[in-house]
Amino acid sequence: MSEKISGAEAIIRGLVAEGVDRVFGYPGGAIIPVYDKLYDHTDEITHILTRHEQGAIHAAQGYARVSGRTGVVIVTSGPAATNVITGLSDAMMDSTPLVVITGQISADLLGSDAFQETDVVGITQPITKWAYQIRNAEEVESALARAFYIANSGRPGPVVLDFAKNAQNQMIEWHPYRKCNFIRSYNPSPDIPEADLRRAADLINAAKRPLIIAGHGVMISGAEDALRALAEKGDIPVGSTLLGLSSLNSDHPLFKGMVGMHGNIGPNFNTNRADVLVCIGMRFDDRVTGEPDKYAPQAKIIHIDIDPSEFNKNIKAYATIHGDARKTLEGLLPMVRENKHTRWIKSFDEANAVEREKVIKDAVSGSDPLAPPHMGEVALAVSLAAGPDPVLVTDVGLNQMLSARYFRYSAPKSIITSGGLGTMGFGLPAAIGARMGAPERTVCYFAGDGGFQMTIQELGTIMQYSTPVKMIVLNNDFLGNVRQWQALFYNNRFSQTPMINPDFNTIADAYRIANERVDCREQLAPAIARMMEHPGAFLLNVRIDECDMVFPMTPNGCAVDHIILNQDNEIFTMNDDGQQ
């Protein structure tokens, strides 16, 4: 005799069958049947009760990004569903696999403006890979299986299942759960034509000034080893996008830094001198390219991506390869000849030497021990004290750019940040999820005082689950990133960027989280040491000079090699002899 179970029980059993052992969420009326059945499966699935639905989805993002698994979120209808919209958009832009289950009113009430009714599918379709409404319990198994397959195949992304309450309660016959591995007309793993590989290899072999730019797709596909092998065999310098950081170790001799608005001088300047660009798993975001018409004018661009919609969308490519990054690089490797580009590589080091002298030197050191530490100095010091293979999680703003630039990466999947959407408030819940996804690694969360307060309630989640996140708040009583633009481009008209902040240390005390305040350089190193020695969560409230800025900088609308070095608007220049 077959077993009869409810739709709510079916979805929980399906999650177990998919290997889910942790979900993030917040209960409510329209999802109570699912939470009731979850009560019977606590030995199989750990539920993390965040303090806000936005916190739940950002935590699931952090978990997914560091672990490579699909993050799962369960929330109720109406405002709970709309509270995850920001996270869905963020996950879509940064290719993060999520399955988000939202409660919904009973199907017979749809369209009646019943309590907490929202058109979840209509709202989320533009910002998800797939959004589907389950109105009948018979659909649960197939919908859930498709959701996991779609979310974490091809170019990963978020999926929404809007679960009507009648379908949660409806009884069905239970059959063994079947995972999905095929959907007609959906091809997440295309075959890579050998002719495309050969064309790209010929371009690389003939190049005099090649440059690899590693995007997020390198880590998503697990292509780090193939990237390193290709770079070493061809003696090709490597730059990375913000989300591509840690795809090659910071100390690798061929890694030349980050590209983009606040990237390193070497890879930015030489992007416009390269004759071949190998761009892997990246979108050519405007923060990377600067003015598109002035981007890489001398280069033949090879664009490798799993998503063909990215080809020629922002930047025209000379050659495209539609395929998984790892498989593509592994296919290219035997076709690429061993080579040497000694003078070309030296030019990156010469440019970065100017950066070290004119920018980094001031950012990581200071002669006055009583002066506030620079943000870059804090990030480097934390990174060096964090032990083996730490994970950097950032919020958005100056804290993001400076911590990403100065943190040291020794292992893949070592940076979790909101790239495409730039979501303030992302960092704190994402750090919680990252620590749960990689409990063996030290998670260091950097935030500004503005972003920290956007999801500060998630300190309650840290308290409840004793999550040992190391939190560094760079506190300057300003919305620092906007302030920098106002200072450089709007004549110091600081409209609505100064902030009056609460005492973050007192707040940490209220959540029973260990904490310290740093006011000057001489306090920094011992405070960081105590933070790292502490076994639990720790908040370090670091006072920063309000005038602190992040350089180098390529302003909006400029070519990527138009690089400002400092507040005096000094522009970087270099001739072919490596002289500025």
Image (cartoon, rainbow, N blue to C red):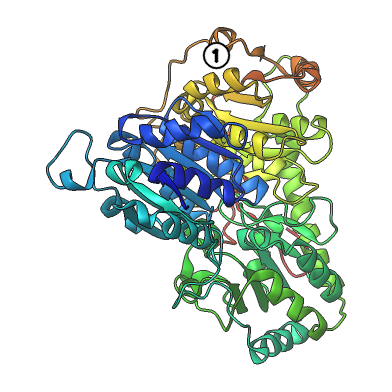
* Residue 330: quadrant of the picture: bottom right
Residue placed at 35% from the left, 27% from the top?
496
Corner quadrant of residue 192: bottom right
Name the one closer to the observer, 97 or 396.
97
User: Foreground: 390 or 366?
Assistant: 390
Quadrant of image for the C terminus: bottom right
In the image, residue 472 sits, relative to residue 484, either above or below, namely above
Q: Nearer the viewer, residue 367 or 449?
A: 449
* Amino acid identity at mark 1: Phe
**Residue 82 x %, y %:** 32, 40
- Coordinates of residue 228 in the picture (x, y in percent): 80, 65
Measuring from the top left, give residue 370's x and y in whole percent. 72, 14
Q: Residue at x 33, y 58 (%)?
A: 126
Badge 1: how crowded within 10 Å, few (<14), some, or many (20+)?
many
Q: From where the camera sits, is residue 413 visible?
A: yes
Query: Dividing the picture into quarters, in which one does residue 358 lie?
Result: top right
Residue farthest to the bottom, as pictured: 195
Q: Is residue 135 above or below residue 364?
A: below
Q: Is residue 536 above or below residue 63?
A: above
Q: Which residue is mark 1?
A: 504
Horizontal side, residue 217 vs residue 158: left or right:
right
Residue 315 seen in the figure: no
Q: Position of residue 258 (x, y in %)?
A: 67, 54
Label count reads: 1
- The residue closer to the viewer here, 69 or 135, is 135
Tell me what residue is drawn at x 55 percent, y 7 percent: 510
| Local SS, label 1 | helix
Q: Is residue 24 left or right of residue 383?
A: left
